Amino acid sequence: MTVGRTGPALGLRPPLPRSTGAWTFRTAQPVTPDLDLVHAWMNDPDVARFWDQAWSREAWREELSAQLADGPAHPCIVERGGLPFAYLELYWSAQHAIAAHYPARDGDVGVHIALGDPAARGAGRGSALLRDTARGVCAVTPGCTRVFAEPDAGNRAARGAFGRAGFHELGEIELAHKRAALVVHTTDPAEVAALRREVVTHPR
């Protein structure tokens, strides 16, 4: 685990978002049925193309176990109407590689998302989930007013979904494994322009 300045104050990993009438968030467990769900979803070609984590079931068991043991991400299963819908990972932005690209502050949370149900892709439900996730994270996380994400720059569908969910694009950044679009959902939209000026594509 990479220990950042936010860890001692805010906990090992971000808390679960507040559940709503539409969505239920729970911690993903490294056992059946969660393990089988995550393994199957990550091996879906559409997901694997951008996540690049089409690992074996055992590798995912180890990954989920490690996340729950020492973080820094919080693996989550999202249910819609009582049925599994998506996989999320929540992380402290200041402990992630994106912190080299913008001035991260205490309480900033990052999110990764994979829609598990192929039928849900393109139906607008992903955008609804992203919007409610951002609001739910800010509602339960002390000091959190901003939720960030870094979808692959080539993933136009994801970028569109984030935009429809109220996320603002700040610029493209170079991470170790991909070129990404840095996006933010903030309770203070007036700060977006300043954030765009501060984004660093290639940190020194």
Image (cartoon, grey):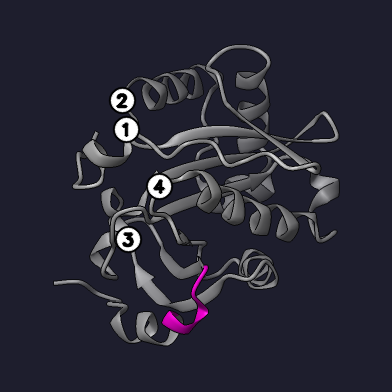
Give the residue type that dot 3 points to. Answer: Ile
Q: In which quadrant is the N terminus drawn?
A: top left
Q: Position of residue 37 (x, y in %)?
A: 68, 26
> Which residue has dot 4 on it?
142
- Whether 165 is drawn above or below 121: the answer is below
The secondary structure that most of the magenta stretch takes on is: helix
The answer to whether mark 4 and mark 1 are in CB contact below 8 A is: no
Mark closer to the chain start, 3 or 2: 2
Disc 2 vs disc 1: which is toward the camera? 1
Disc 1 vs disc 3: which is toward the camera? 1
> Which residue has dot 2 on it?
70
What is the secondary structure assignment of the residue under circle 4?
Answer: loop
- Name the residue rendered at 67%, 72% in the picture: 160
Mark closer to the chain start, 4 or 1: 1
- Name the residue rendered at 28%, 63% in the picture: 104
Give the residue type that dot 2 points to. Answer: Asp
| Dot 4 crowding, Cα within 10 Å, few <14, some 14–19, many 20+ | some
Decide if residue 13 is on the left or right side of residue 202.
right
| Dot 2 crowding, Cα within 10 Å, few <14, some 14–19, many 20+ | few
Q: In which quadrant is the C terminus drawn?
A: bottom left
